[in-house]
Amino acid sequence: MEFSTKSGSPEKQRTGSVVVGIFEPRKMTLAAELLDKAAAGYLSEIIKRGDMEGKAGTTLLLHHVPGVLADRVLLVGLGKEREFREKEYQAAMRLAVRTLNETGAFDATFYLTEIAVKKRSLAWRVRQATLLAEEVTYRFDQFKSRKEELRRPLKKITFSIERRNELPQAEEAIKQGCAIAEGMALTRTLANMPPNVCTPTYLAEEAKKLAAEFKLSCDILERADMEKLGMHSLLAVAKGSHQPPKLIVLHYKGGKASEKPVVLVGKGITFDTGGISLKPPAEMDEMKFDMSGAASVLGTMKAVAGMRLPVNLTVVVPTAENMPGGGATRPGDIVTSLSGQTVEILNTDAEGRLVLCDALTYCERFDPDIVVDVATLTGACVIALGHVTTGLLANNDGLARELIAAGEEAHDRAWQLPLWDDYQDLLKSNFADMANIGGRTAGTITGACFLSRFTKKFNWAHLDIAGTAYLSGKEKGSTGRPVPMLSYFLLKRAGKLN
Ligand code: BES
Ligand code: MN
Ligand code: ZN
């Protein structure tokens, strides 16, 4: 998709379609009024008859509106003006793009970006509009032998900007929106990929491609390297699989050399059968999404490098396949992690924390400013928070607040759960320093408690994306979350969030 900005009246646009909003009940936005005036009351007539009352979720496509140069006018219902917030803005934008994309429009000029949204800037409106347009038109059809051809998909979007002096910041916002969207698309494509294709080796190859594209430095640790280092917790997860594990490291240096990096760590289990603690068969295919954390940190790297943000960012991906096999780890096995702490593996299905703990210890060598890990870690998180919000736990409240604020601004939200010491007792083992599970209660918290034992040397936050990384059922597929949250977090740190 191509994006541009323009400032001018809607009736004068020589474009395939103009998109304007109508509030409920029957209240025209400024752009709609201008069209109506040029069309000698044509729109007010339609509105009066009740064909478009402004209800949220409704649209009306008009052809050859008199006095208007564009071929079509798309009216989009916005709901009540008093209730028009970021969620409603985003819904209207999504609906407009989807409608145009399905009706065979080639280019369109959107006047929705002129509508005020409480607490949100013009740059926000344009950035989000760009991102949503790309998100809505994303397709994953590389494994369909007959592709569904859209007649003529939407190719060009122009955002109307009221004041000419605002054009530069809108252009900047488009660039940011595109970069974040490209990051999300990478995340979604990696996560949607079938698990016979997307193996740890495949992820490592994709990381190398990303490194070549953006001139990042890239390090892939092989099994032998990890054995030498003593990453026996990570290695234990890979033992039942024919696929060799990898530890992927990427560095982007956009900031001053003296600046400590932000480190993102993503869980990269390319398929989680549960191992010997085998999962039940229902929906097990969805465990191909168990590398969504990895996909999201790679996607965020793409977004940040694409925006050339003045920050130093390191991405670490511990990746393995969790399979039952003759060599697989057994419940009761004890391993020594890279940190030197021993772990009794009571459940081989709690494998995410086993790969993450060694990756987190490995982060110490980067002298990080902060570390954020991203993981589809616990089913308990889906029960607690559903598919709406990501679970957040941190050993530093300032960092937690920053991430929550970024999530709110990106409308990709997180909610904090407590990481109090009182929960640590649940991880007691009779035979090793700790067990890898904490029993039936507070599963998301005990998962984070386990990780907290490996993050004592830096400021750290953990994002449990088990409920938010992908959708099930008819809409099955990766969401690309939490790339928007992490991108906004880094935009803010870089001082580039207008
Ligand atoms: N990948 C799963 C978590 C998961 C479950 C993600 C459902 C998305 C949907 C993770 O490896 C796992 O199996 N966790 C166990 C932990 C338990 C054994 C302590 C779980 O949540 O049941
Ligand atoms: Mn598991
Ligand atoms: Zn898992």
Image (cartoon, helix red, strand yellow):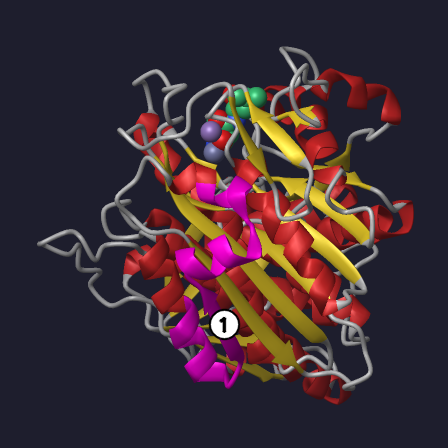
Where is residue 470? Give x, y as percent. Answer: 46, 40
Residue under numbered circle 1:
219
Give the residue type at disc 1.
Asp
Task: Tell me: 180 left or right of 164.
Answer: left
Span of residues in magenta: 207-235
Residue 484 lies in the magenta-colored region? no
* Percent of width and height locating residue 271: 35, 39
x 73%, y 60%: residue? 364
Q: Quadrant of the N terminus?
A: bottom left
Q: Examine the structure image and report whether residue 225 is included in the region drawn in magenta.
A: yes
Q: Whole-percent x and y of residue 205?
A: 35, 68
Between residue 447 and residue 474, name the one nearer to us.
Answer: 447
Q: Residue at x 17, y 52 (%)?
A: 143
Q: Residue at x 15, y 51 (%)?
A: 144
Query: In which quadrant is the C terminus drawn?
Result: bottom right
Q: From what the image shows, is residue 8 above or below residue 20?
A: below
Total label count?
A: 1
Q: Main secondary structure of the magenta part?
A: helix
Out of 297 and 414, give the one closest to the viewer.
Answer: 297
Q: Is residue 52 visible?
A: no
What percent of the width, then of the height, locates residue 243? Answer: 29, 48
List the single residue furthest toward the left.
Answer: 145
